Image (spheres, coloured by chain):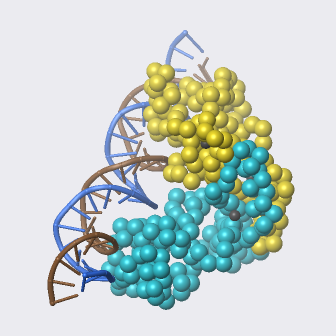
Chain colours: A cyan, B yellow, C brown, D blue
Amino acid sequence: MSTPDDLKTAGLKATMPRLKILSLFEQGEARHLSADDIYNTLIGEGFDIGFATVYRVLTQFEQAGLLTRHHFENDRSVFELNQGGHHDHIMCLQCGRVEEFYDPEIEKRQVEAAEKLGFTIRDHSLYLYGDCTRTRCPHRK
Amino acid sequence: MSTPDDLKTAGLKATMPRLKILSLFEQGEARHLSADDIYNTLIGEGFDIGFATVYRVLTQFEQAGLLTRHHFENDRSVFELNQGGHHDHIMCLQCGRVEEFYDPEIEKRQVEAAEKLGFTIRDHSLYLYGDCTRTRCPHRK
DNA sequence: ATGTAAACGATAATCATTCTCATGTAAAGC
DNA sequence: GCTTTACATGAGAATGATTATCGTTTACAT
Ligand SMILES: [Mn+2]
Ligand SMILES: [Mn+2]
Ligand SMILES: [Zn+2]
Ligand SMILES: [Zn+2]
């Protein structure tokens, strides 16, 4: 559960929609949530909320540094709680499962590649797409 | 300029819209073109074409292996001719300039990271975002 | 408790992309 | 060259995610 102070610290008023949304991430059912996921979960719990609020709050949380927004290769954004530091993602094209990884050598070489071209990196995105190699993908939908 | 055979080889009828679009990439004014870029350029040249055709043809070219589709961190897709092999991209957040790079070590480590997680990579996307370090960004809009 | 600026939710608007469908055309066969 | 026909095209509607608008509600400082 998230506490009102989590929001106040981030410079945001502690409103009910914000607390509910932050809680969804903190209680950790799933690490990567879309606006749609959040809207449907909260409506399903009987909490009255609108898409406008969901999108507004997600953007505010991103700007406040509470969440990171990801653009996988489909059309919608997913969000993830900022905890445990930066990492990159791999998604199974069969079942949609997402796993995380971090390779400091890749990170370093990204900076170097940018420098060689006269750029200073501010951000980057790295997504791998593939298939679970297990005989039967355990997450097949 | 593109020749009808370029299309026939790819298993596509040599129609006027397809030839025009492929030529835009081959004559190389810009390496990275959006559907909007293509539509506006052709309309500007007095050639009558619709967005439906532009999007349809771009998808066909992608499936035929003639083009690669890129999703930068904005909302629209850009396309690039498949020549010279795979590479990744860095975009200037100030002026939108795009440069290309390729680091075999990064590529190798991506495959290894995937293997460790039990995945076989089929595709990946790596985009760096930053600023031109030159005193005055030469491409500022 | 009250006042006020901020936040909310319903709904309309955007915008890139895709779909529908009536018409046009490339190229295969005569 | 001329038909045939399956495939391609362009206009415009539809889609789907996200954003903007706006009247109402609420957090919270006074
Ligand atoms: Mn990374
Ligand atoms: Mn790459
Ligand atoms: Zn899988
Ligand atoms: Zn620049």
Given residues A10 and A70, the one toward you in this image is: A10
Q: Position of residue A127 (x, y in %)?
A: 67, 61
Query: Is there any visible trace of residue A133 in the rendered image?
Result: no
User: Looking at the rendering, in which quadrant would you find the C terminus of chain A?
Assistant: bottom right
**Residue at x-position 49% and y-position 38%:** B36
Q: Is residue A139 left or right of residue B120?
A: left
**In this rendering, is residue D11 above or below B119?**
above
In percent of width and height, residue B60 lies at 60, 41
Residue at 71% over, 39% down? B82
Q: Nearer the viewer, residue A46 or A104?
A: A104
C20 left or right of B88 in image: left
Q: In the rendered view, would you say A100 is above or below B16? A: below
Foreground residue among A48 and B3: A48
Which residue is pictured at 73% across the width and 50% down the height? A114
* Residue located at (62% from left, 32% from top): B30
Residue A140 pos. (x, y %):
64, 74
